[in-house]
Amino acid sequence: MNSLEGIQRAKAPRDSFAKIQQRLADQRKQQPSIKQQSSYGWMKIAAVIALVIISNIWAVSNFMSSNTSETPGNYTQLIADFNLYENE
């Protein structure tokens, strides 16, 4: 029951309040630079979206040009070569 006897309260250092105020003041100074950096975030997202769209357009145009250059005769020969139901 007397285990707390002789214990004193912890005392904070004398300059701790000043250190806290200084840290808060430093954070306030750094906040405008953080906002300036985040304002370019939408440009990065727009650049990625544009890159995806352009690469898709390029892929589709290459696919369409490769299909138009193929003659129908080659396609029918390909079907005849891979006839799985030859017995019917």
Image: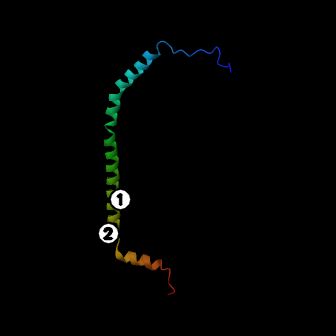
Image coordinates of residue 33 in percent, x first then y, are: 33, 29
Outermost front residue: 1
Q: Residue at x 43, y 20 (%)?
A: 20
Image coordinates of residue 8 in percent, x first then y, are: 59, 14
Marked residue nearer the N-terminal end (1 or 2): 1
Image coordinates of residue 34 in percent, x first then y, are: 35, 31
Location of residue 5 by image quarter: top right
What amino acid type is highlighted by mark number 2? Answer: Thr
Q: Residue at x 43, y 76 (%)?
A: 78
Q: Which mark is residue 68?
A: 2
Q: Is residue 81 above or below residue 57?
A: below
Q: Are marks 1 and 2 in contact (CB under 8 Å)?
A: no
Residue 9 horizontal side relative to residue 61, left or right: right
Residue 63 horizontal side relative to residue 12, left or right: left
Residue situated in front as seen by the camera: 59 or 2: 2
Q: Is residue 78 above or below residue 2?
A: below
Q: Secondary structure at mark 2?
A: helix
Q: Residue at x 35, y 63 (%)?
A: 63
Q: CA distance from mark 1 to mark 2?
A: 14 Å
Q: Secondary structure at mark 1?
A: helix
What amino acid type is highlighted by mark number 1? Answer: Ala
Residue situated in front as seen by the camera: 6 or 87: 6
Outermost bottom residue: 88
Residue 60 horizontal side relative to residue 81, left or right: left
Q: Residues within 10 Å of mark 1 (few under 14, many from 20)?
A: few
Q: Is residue 62 above or below residue 49?
A: below
Chosen colour scheme: rainbow
Residue under label 1, please give it.
Answer: 59
Image coordinates of residue 40 in percent, x first then y, are: 31, 38
Q: Residues within 10 Å of mark 2 (few under 14, many from 20)?
A: few
